[in-house]
Image (cartoon, rainbow, N blue to C red):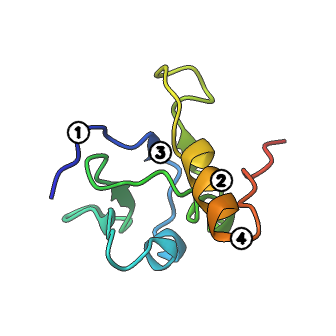
Amino acid sequence: MARSRPGHFYIDETCIGCGACEHACPGKVDAIYRVEGDFLGRFAIVLDHCIDCGFCVPLCPVDCIHDARAVGIVDGKGGYTHIQALQAWAGAPPLRAPARG
């Protein structure tokens, strides 16, 4: 089911096809898929399914998953902000945005 607002995370061409991101993506979301026919077995994100949870980002061993808002590709907000508000309401520990360095 497509949402009205697409996600903001994307996987660049340095993906090594390890699959860590696919395993991190919440099961009911299933926004990450292996690119069919790609020689290296790389992965991509279906932006219409991505919920901007960011769980895939810290698990990537080659740092190839990026937030398009943080690198200036798109404007917008949501994702972490909305998730943090929900976690605060539920009393869960806050999700921290991965550090870029």
Q: Nearer the viewer, mark 1 or mark 3?
A: 1
- Amino acid on which disc 3 is placed: Phe
- Comes first in the chain, label 1 or label 3: 1
> Dot 2 corresponds to which residue?
84
- Comes first in the chain, label 2 or label 3: 3
Residue 83 quadrant: bottom right
Residue 18 seen in this snapshot:
no
- Comes first in the chain, label 2 or label 1: 1
Question: Where does the image place residue 87, in percent across and percent down from the top left?
Answer: 64, 63
Give the numbered dot on residue 4: 1
**Mark 4 and mark 2: Cα distance apart in space:** 10 Å
**Mark 2 and mark 3: Cα distance apart in space:** 17 Å
Q: Nearer the viewer, mark 2 or mark 3?
A: 2
Identity of the residue furthest to the left in this view: 1
> Dot 4 corresponds to which residue?
91
Q: Is residue 29 left or right of residue 23?
A: left
Above or below for 26 versus 86: below
